[in-house]
Image: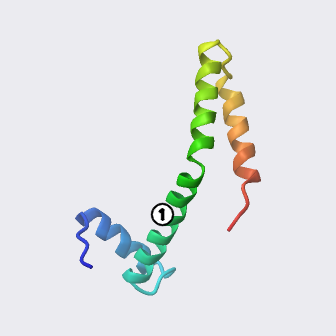
Amino acid sequence: MEIRLRPELEAAIRQDVQRGAYQTVDEYVEHAVSILHEQEAWLASHRTEIEAQINEGYAAAQRGELLEPDEVRSRLRELKQAKPRR
C-alpha cells in the first residue's frame, strides 16, 4: 500500500521518530493507525449512547438548563483525572 502525505505531516512524523519513541516511520504509522482504529471502533459501539446524551444536553439547553463555564471546566478536569491511563 502506498500512502501520500502532505509534506508538513511527513515532517511531523519524521520529527517524532527522531525523538526516539519509534524505531521506524512504519512503526509510528502502525501505532497511529491502531489508536485511530480503536477510537473509531469505540465510537461505533457507543454511537447510540452518544447521540442520546447529545439529545439530552440539547433538550436541557432548550429548557434553559445551562452550566456556567467554570463549572464545565471543573467537570472536564474531573473526567480527565478519572480517565484510566493506558
What x and y, as percent, mark residue 36?
48, 63
- Residue 10: x and y in percent read 29, 70
**Residue pointed to by mark 1:** 36
In the displayed structure, would residue 70 be above or below residue 83?
above
In the rendered view, would you say 85 is above or below 61? Answer: below
Quadrant occupied by the N terminus = bottom left
Expressed as whole percent of the image width and height from the top left, the position of residue 40 reads 50, 58
User: Left of 2 or right of it: where is 21?
Assistant: right
Give the residue at the far top of this rendering: 63
Q: Tally the numbered discs.
A: 1
Amino acid at the residue labelled 1: Leu
Camera-side residue: 54 or 78? 54
Residue 41: x and y in percent read: 53, 60
Q: Horizontal placement of 64 versus 38: left or right? A: right
Disc 1 element: helix
Dot 1 surroundings within 10 Å: few (below 14), some, or many (20 or more)?
few
- Residue at x 26%, y 72% (from the top left corner): 3
Write the residue at 24% across / 63% down: 6
Of the 4 image quadrants, the one containing the C terminus is: bottom right
Q: Residue at x 48, y 82 (%)?
A: 22
Q: Is residue 81 shown above or below 31?
A: above
**Image quadrant assignment for residue 25:** bottom left
Residue that sits furthest to the bottom in the current view: 23
